[in-house]
Image: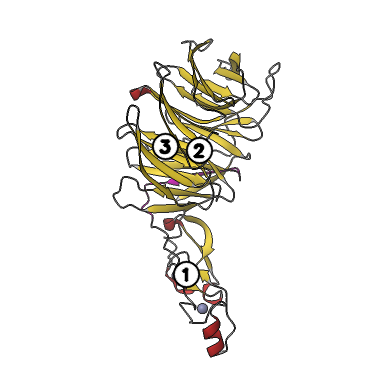
Amino acid sequence: MGEEAPENYNSQEPSGWPRCTLGAARARSRGRLLLEAARDRTVRVWLKRDSGQYWPSIYYVMPSPCSCMSFNPETRRLSIGLDNGTISEFILSEDYNKMTPVRNYQAHQSRVTMILFVLELEWVLSTGQDKLFAWHCSESARRLGGYRTSAVASGLQFDVETRHVFIGDQSGQVTILTLEQDTCTLVTAFRGHTGGVTALCWDPVQRVLFSGSSDHSVIMWDIGGRKGTAIELQGHNDKVQALSYAQHTRQLISCGGDGGIVVWNMDVERQETPEWLDSDSCQKCDQPFFWNFKQMWDSKKIGLRQHHCRKCGKAVCGKCSSKRSSIPLMGFEFEVRVCDSCHEAITDEERAPTATFHDSKHNIVHVHFDATRGWLLTSGTDKVIKLWDMTPVVS
Ligand SMILES: [Zn+2]
Ligand SMILES: [Zn+2]
């Protein structure tokens, strides 16, 4: 990815158009097409003209602020979630100059947070501020079923083949359900993050689920069960807010509040981080930690603070873990605490980064990767939509 974006498009600039009132503009780029649904209730479709500029071809006002959208290029079906709980569906004309309302779903009691259209099953999956996951038939608009989540959902993915739905919520939980036509079964629910889940991304080929979180980390869950592992990826200094996956190159793109775009090479075999061991004393030098009053009393030593080596998981004192190292093969792209013996054992080869880092210079809230062109669209809280040519990096 170049330092300069090949085409930056500022949604505030085109004259005559109202501003987005909030930053959470959702947009999808498909080559010459850019769709935008904004908090000021407007839906705009932008076409790239021969001049190389994007010009609006559709301007549509919704009855309520837009909160999310889903676009299916094959059917040109555009589904828009609104603050009032409604999902409105439109079909775009072939020349993208007109959008025709098709149907409305009264899907939720309050703001729709995520929409996923499943063409193969003619289903519309959605989650809302009302803590409900619901699915509707996209032909009849009939409600097929619902499931109450533990908190408001902010990540939604679906595996067409096995009909598993993945719901990540603000409590940090990921819930997996199996959907039938009008019933659902809870498969499992798991937690790995210390913060809320902000985004989910599913790779149907490798059968791995990626979850991004406000705890700054991404976790890769080996759902396919080959190893049942969970690998932590630490590459952001702020909330991870958006994820995208380039299936053909097996690269994960994570974006966050720090403006960072991190491209992870998922072909690399990474190791799970060890469970942190609890010990009353340093597992290297045997000095007692400060809460081990009896041993402290017996040996008349002052207690030390317990730290953990990120590589071996051992409880060690500060003196035995004074050095820092990145451990990319364990997902730590930044330097973390390691014990002295692990520090000696880590080779330079093991320290080679397995991700590339790029600065988008805005607080990214939404991302869309167009695999056919290798373009990445980011939209930020600054209301700016940026298009990045990722071909030098994602290949
Ligand atoms: Zn020690
Ligand atoms: Zn260690």
The answer to whether residue 169 is visible is yes
Q: Which residue is mark 1?
A: 343
Kindly state the secondary structure of the residue where label 2 is placed: strand
Q: Which residue is mark 2?
A: 153
- Dot 3 alpha-carbon crowd within 10 angstroms: few under 14, some 14 to 19, many 20 or more: some
Q: In this rendered view, identify the residue nearer to me: 271 or 163.
A: 163
Can you tell which of label 1 and label 2 is closer to the viewer?
A: 2
Cα distance in 3D space between marks 2 and 3: 24 Å
Q: Which mark is residue 246?
A: 3
| Residue numbers of the magenta segment | 257-270
Question: x, y percentage for residue 222?
Answer: 35, 48
Q: In this rendered view, identify the residue nearer to me: 24 or 256.
A: 24
Kindly state the secondary structure of the residue where label 3 is placed: strand
Whether the residues at callouts 1 and 2 have beta carbons within 8 Å, the answer is no
Q: Which residue is at a point 68% across and 25% down the rendered structure image?
A: 12
Q: Is residue 340 above or below residue 30?
A: below
Ligand 2 within 8 Å of the CB at mark 1 = yes
Kindly state the secondary structure of the residue where label 1 is placed: helix
Q: In this rendered view, identify the residue nearer to me: 247 or 3.
A: 247
Cα distance in 3D space between marks 1 and 3: 34 Å
Disc with the residue nearer the chain's start (1 vs 2) = 2
Q: Which residue is at a point 60% across and 14% down the rendered structure image?
A: 60
Q: Quadrant of residue 20?
A: top right
- The quadrant the C terminus occupies is top left
- Label 3 sits on what residue type? Ala
Magenta region includes residue 84: no
- Label 2 sits on what residue type? Ala
Q: Which residue is at a point 47% across and 74% down the rendered structure image?
A: 279
Question: x, y percentage for residue 57?
Answer: 58, 13
- Dot 2 alpha-carbon crowd within 10 angstroms: few under 14, some 14 to 19, many 20 or more: many
Q: Which residue is at a point 52% across and 81% down the rendered structure image?
A: 288
**How many marks overall?**
3
